[in-house]
Image (cartoon, grey):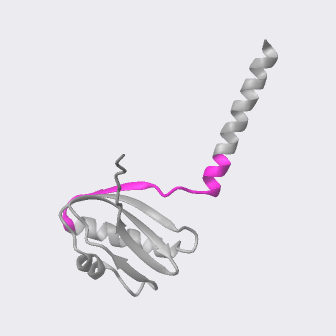
Amino acid sequence: MIEKAVYLLACLVAAIVLLSITSKLFPHPQKTELKGSKLEVLRDLAKIIQQCYSKCSKNVVCKHLKINSEKITADEILNSLDYSKLGAEVRVEDLSEKCEIVIRCENGILYVEKVKYERISS
């Protein structure tokens, strides 16, 4: 009986160690919520886009964000960026009042895209 308990405990510890190692090897982008006035959200979003550019080579999907603000157009986002600190081309979609977005890097281009959920009907 004690041997089974020790075996189960060893398996549990091994599973936790394995999970810890894989989560560090394959980091999942964290979901962050941005809320407040349009200007606050634009400022925070510009800061996050510039951070994603600096680690663009490491991750394909850099950040998963939930936006809770007024409608923000692509031009407003592009105008809020400091291009002297940004060496990549940025492509942005218009954002609705409440939406989820993904900031991703592909071939040196940063994309700011709304997450689209598709329904599968039977």
Q: Residue at x 75, y 19 (%)?
A: 5
Q: Nearer the viewer, residue 60 or 58?
A: 60
Q: Depth check: give the residue in front, 92 or 43.
A: 92
Which of the image's four quarters has the N terminus? top right
User: In the picture shown, does residue 118 fall above or below 44?
Assistant: above
Figure check: 1 above or below 68: above
Left or right: 73 as drawn, with respect to 12:
left
Magenta segment boundaries in residue numbering: 20-38
* 122 vs 6, nearest the viewer: 122
Residue 69 picture quarter: bottom left
Residue at the spot 61% in from the left edge and 51% down from the top edge? 23
Q: Is residue 34 magenta?
A: yes
What residue sits 52% from the left and 55% below the top? 28
Q: Where is residue 70 in the image (x, y as percent from the top left)?
A: 17, 63
- The residue lying at 68 percent from left, 37 percent from top is 15
Displayed quadrant of residue 74: bottom left
72 sits to left or right of 111: left
Whether residue 103 is in magenta: the answer is no
Rendered location of residue 43, percent (x, y): 29, 70
